[in-house]
Amino acid sequence: MFRRSNRIKRPSLFWLLTEAGRATAEIGISYPYRYLFAEKNSGDGHPVIVLPGFMATDASTIQLRDYINKLGYTALPWKMGRNYGHTHYIEQLGEYVDQLYQLHGCKVSIIGWSLGGIFARQLAKAHPDKVRQVITLGAPFRGVGKANNVAWLYNFLKGTRRVAPASQELLDDLPKPAPVPTTAIYTKQDGIVPWQLCMEEKETRIHQNIEVRSSHFGMAHNPSVLRIIADRLQLEEYSWREFSTNYMLEDWILYPSVS
């Protein structure tokens, strides 16, 4: 599923080696934010599936789902164990989306972290009538086959030569935008995947890229990201608008891409 490219380099060794420390700090900071500053019980209760990243499980998204529940939505795990990157997950998740749509009688929002974000976009393409919106966190959908630190780490840990390849048809389709409102959150301090690959090639009325200051592993805990998620989940397609803040200083410090 991953291939080399000379056009975009993998993230620097510095950002990779500091991932764990930065993520730990973000997790610590998220506690007071989630319990003291975030709005609670303002959501409409619609289901929100949270998809974990490569080699991660639902345990990695427990805190994020707890936060979403406190906002007044129904946060759900993906229930498929460890994310090994198998492409057949997309079909199984499609059945999950259909079940939730029938059960709740409304569209489903999907939040995908890293590889989970790639799956989220593909689900929205396959089921646009049942997906309300997609939010991706550091998901390299514009080039999973390009230089990154995920394949290197996987090969090191597993002692294998390569990650099982996806079909060329799927790889060609990944960069194409989903026909539903999509927020692509990325960070230039990403130590795992090149941030350039985590953005829509072209922003539209329903597709927005938002830069935050975060690590890759701490993105789902970062207060700046949590604020974006809270803002996005309250919107429906007819009320969709770009994420914005009220102060220029806040933009520069927390959201450099937001004008």
Image: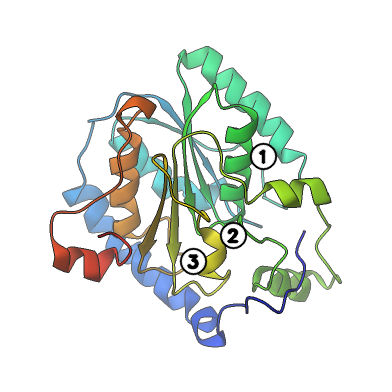
Residue 254 placement, left or right of 214: left
Q: Earlier in the sequence, mark 1 or mark 3?
A: 1
Q: Is residue 179 above or below residue 188?
A: above
Q: Is residue 38 above or below residue 106?
A: below
Mark 2 sits on what residue? Answer: 140
User: Badge 3 local density, few (<14 within 10 Å), some, or many (20+)?
Assistant: many
Q: Position of residue 112 (x, y in %)?
A: 53, 47
- Tell me which corner region of the image, top left, top right, bottom left or bottom right, holds residue 211: bottom left
Q: Earlier in the sequence, mark 2 or mark 3?
A: 2
Quadrant of the drawing holding the N terminus: bottom right
Residue 151 placement, left or right of 201: right
Q: Amino acid at mark 3?
A: His
Mark 3 sits on what residue? Answer: 216
- Tell me which corner region of the image, top left, top right, bottom left or bottom right, holds residue 225: bottom left
- In the rendering, which numbered label is found on residue 80? 1
Q: Amino acid at mark 2?
A: Pro
Q: Is residue 193 above or below residue 107?
A: below
Q: Amino acid at mark 1?
A: Met
Quadrant of the drawing holding the C terminus: bottom left
Residue 174 placement, left or right of 196: right
Q: Nearer the viewer, residue 170 or 28?
A: 170
Q: Position of residue 235 (x, y in %)?
A: 32, 32
